[in-house]
Each structure stands twice: as C-alpha cells, then as structure tokens.
Amino acid sequence: MTRHHILSILLLTILIPITAVLFHNYSAFSPVFRARFSQMATTNKSPVIVVGAGLAGLSASYSAIQSGASVRLLERAPKPGGNSIKASSGINGAPTRFQNVEKYGVDTSFWDDTTRSAGVRLNSASVSPTVKRRREELITVLTNRSASAIDFLTDLGVDLSVVAQLGGHSLPRTHRGAGKTPPGASIVTTLLTKLKEQGPDRFQLVTDSEVTRLLTDSNAPKGTVKVTGVEYKNRQDGSTRLLHGPVVFTTGGFAGDTHGLLAKYRPDLDGLPSTNDPRPGTHTILSDVGAKLVDMDAVQIHPTGFIDPANPASPLKFLAAEMLRGEGGILLHNGKRVINELQTREKVSNALMALPAKNEDSLRQWDVQLLLDPGATEAAAGHVGFYLWKGLLQKKKIAELDETTRQTLKEYAAVVRGEKEDELGRKAFGNWRLTEEDVDEGEEEVCVGRVTPITHFTMGGAVFNTKAQILTAELGEEQEGKEIEGLWGAGEITGGLHGDNRLGGSSLLECVVFGRVAGEEAAKYRV
C-alpha cells in the first residue's frame, strides 16, 4: 500500500465520523464513540449555571443534563436541599396512576382549584385581561404537567403512592410516600443521588458559594439585557470568582428574611415566626439587571407551625404538616373547633389570627391545639413518629383531656359518622375513626400539640413566562422581546403563578415543573 493510500484512509477515518455528526446521523458508529463525542461536544460549551440547590435547582440541573448540558450548581448554604428538603405534606399531581379513580373519578378539577385559590389577584373584575391571561397561562403549565412530574419522580425511584386531600382541594391529589421519610427529603435526596451519578464532567455541586451579582453583556443591543454568568463569593475563604454560562436562578423566597424583604413588603407580619431559615432574600440580584417583581406583598401564612415546649420562643418552627389535618386532625382553641380545617391556608390562618395573640419574647404567637385521633395518627405515622420524637406532639388518653375538649370530640365523631352536618362545613374527614363511645370510655390515646400561624411561603417574585424566562416587563405589559437573554427562574423566586394564595402541595410541584422547563431551555441556549 502506497503512502498516498495510507494518508487517504487516515483522512477518511477522521472526516466520515465528523460529517456524520454534523448531519445528526452517527447511529452506525459504536456506542463508545458516540458517548465520547457527546462528552466532547458538552465540554466545548459553557455549563448551565444553576443558583440554589433546593428542589427547583435540582430539577433544573437534572433536566439540563438530560438535555445534553453540563451543570455547575452553586449553593450558599453548607448543604444542599434548601427549604424543599423540609417539605412534609407532599406534591400535587392530577390525574395520576395513584389516585383512586373508582372512588373519585378522573381528577379534572386541579386547574379550577388552583385558579380559585389565586383569589382576587386573578379573579377580581378589576384584573386586566392581560394579567389574567398571563396568570392562567402559568397555572395551565403547572397543572397540565403535574402528572408527568409525578411520573418523572416515580421513575427516578421516589415513592409517591399515598394520596391525601389538603385544604383548598376538591379531592385527594397530594402525593407522598408510604414510609417514614417526608416527601421533601425523599425527593431531594433521590435527585441528588441521580445527579452525583453523572460524574464531575457533567455535574458539580459547589456549596458555601453565594452569588453576589449577575454578569451581563455590555454590548447587548439597546433596550435588551443579556446575562453571561455570575459572580460568587466562596464563604469559606472569602474569595470572589466568576463563572460564565447561561443562568437558572432558583434561590427561593424571603419568608425567613424577617427584618429585610419581609419587613419591607409586609411590615404587618413583623414578629411572626417562620418555617424558613433566617437568611436574606436574593430578589435584588435579579432586579439589578432589570427583572420586574410582582406580588411581593403576597405572603402565605401557614396556619400550623409547632411551638416546641422546650423552646417556645424560637423564631424557627417545624411545620405541622397540612396532611395531619387532611388525615383527620382538628384545630382547637380553649377546647373548641374554630374553622373547617380543610379550608385554604389563608382562611384557616385568618381564623386563627383573629383569636387573641400571646407575645413570647417579641414573637407573636397563638395558643391553638392540634389533635389527632388514633385513625389520623396511624395514617400519618411517618410524620407523627418524628413529631413525637422531637417532643412536638404528645400522646394523651382521652380521659386526661378537659371536659370541653371531650365534648367537642363527641360532637365531631357524630359528624364523621354522618349523624349531622358539620356546622363549620367540613365534609372530608380523612381517617378519623374515634366514636362517641370511645370518648366516653376515655381509654383511647390521641396526639396533641400546640401550633401557631407562621410565615411560610412568598407568592411574589420575578415576573417570568411559560418558558421560565425572567422578564423585564411587568405582568400586565407586552412581554415579547422583554426576556432577559440567558436567564431563567423557577420555584419560589418567581412570581405571578399563585396569586393571593398557594395551594398546599403545589410548592414542590412548581419546583419540579418549572425547574425542568428552565433546565431544558438553558441547555438548548448554551453557547
């Protein structure tokens, strides 16, 4: 064979695979070759930068990797998970394989329940048609993709087989696992495991790294904004670093920023404890590059945060999961029920906060009792076991309760058995099984704990669209051409989706749905 022939063969060996790849037709080559070329293509492009390692950030990271990108996930805390890892009630989805179709039929009312929960910000006659359409577009994406979100997590190995009905829902659609691990922790740890399996070339998590500003292109056309990366500070050594690439912002809300953004937008809530870690909100990082904020005064008060008997004045509370009421638990003040426990969080919180408050070391708290009968206790065993271990719930025999409480239990038991209508309007009773006879005998054990309304979730945030792009337009303005190039958002940092009030179980859902959208869009954008 001549030297000319050898050179020709070598040249063909190089050009044929390259040509095939350019025309997206390289299936004939070996899997090893395809994997190696794909890895080379990925490393030759900027990574997708995800800021915030809660569920929205983890979902965005996984979606970006599945779409062919590499990911750098920056988290300001020492550990990932954010507030998502604490979520205890579950994640909404409809219609799903786990819902009881025989009993309830196919679930077609999720969209209706969500729009109704959004309150006057969506449903008032004074709301402009544009604002109404924008909000409904976001709700449509959330609800229409909820079933696929459940499938996505289930296929990853998350148990979501138990379905409960929470306040504001017309039927059961909030999914959690049958084991003792709360749904937030189960979902977060599963996604983290899957991400770490991708290897350092595809995924890197960098903790103790706080993003201080977004980098922008000074040569972007007038009237437009292009984000090119982030500046972040390493909190261990104090160094400042730059990272270039498209950015997905998933840093959460500001319910725990008591003396910062919360005091600025809702000074009337000053002094309320919170389920969220006390840390500053990051919304100004987005507004500094032109992002518009919406609904910043819409702060959700969760009606039930546990008051720890060992530390009643702690500003950080464990959430008394809404599913405790969904499974049958009731709320008592001076031994009497005060509200239909399955009303929306807003209505339940308002009813409890109308009661006399009790100030404890500058905190405003209320003296409300959460009570679960043996049926509700058993149905919520995974949560109850943890709360008992923490000392937030205690077991008591009915005979140990005061006379007013025992009489309330007898009246409620009669309602559950269908002997009379509930004066407060409750129609679903979960797994409550206590009878009037059980109350008279007094030997059954119930679980009781003290709870109070707490700041829990902020509906407000950056205006974004159905592709999770952060916008420089107000919610009611024309949005075409107002997208901030190279910047997406998901989770509690965004606004306009929930309106006045978020349905329980939809916070984890929005993290998964819009996190996946943002990750996919950012992966497609890479330069």
Image (cartoon, helix red, strand yellow):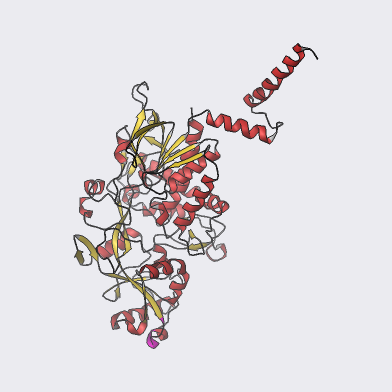
Q: Residue at x 33, y 82 (%)?
A: 406
| Position of 277 relative to 10 (above/below) | below
Name the outermost residue toward the bottom.
441
Q: Between residues 213 and 433, which one lies in front from this camera angle?
A: 213
Q: Position of residue 437 (x, y in %)?
A: 41, 86
| Position of 201 relative to 304 (above/below) | above
| Position of 202 relative to 454 (above/below) | above
Q: Position of residue 289 (x, y in %)?
A: 32, 32
Q: Total number of numbered labels?
A: 0
Q: Position of residue 237 (x, y in %)?
A: 34, 39
Q: Quadrant of residue 88?
A: bottom left
Q: Between residues 8 and 184, which one lies in front from this camera angle?
A: 8
Q: Position of residue 221 (x, y in %)?
A: 37, 21
Q: Between residues 270 and 86, which one lies in front from this camera angle?
A: 86
Q: Residue at x 51, y 52 (%)?
A: 190
Please state the extent of the stretch shown in magenta in the rendering. 439-444
Q: Residue at x 26, y 58 (%)?
A: 315
On the question of residue 495 being in view, the answer is: no
Position of residue 429 in the picture relative to residue 212 (left or right): right
Q: Residue at x 42, y 62 (%)?
A: 166
Q: Residue 32 lies in magenta, yes or no?
A: no
On the question of residue 509 being in view, the answer is: yes
| Position of 296 relative to 329 (above/below) | above
Q: Between residues 453 and 348, which one lies in front from this camera angle?
A: 453
Position of residue 490 in the picture relative to residue 365 (left or right): right
**Screen quadrant of the N terminus:** top right
Q: Quadrant of residue 494?
A: top left
Name the outermost residue toward the right.
1
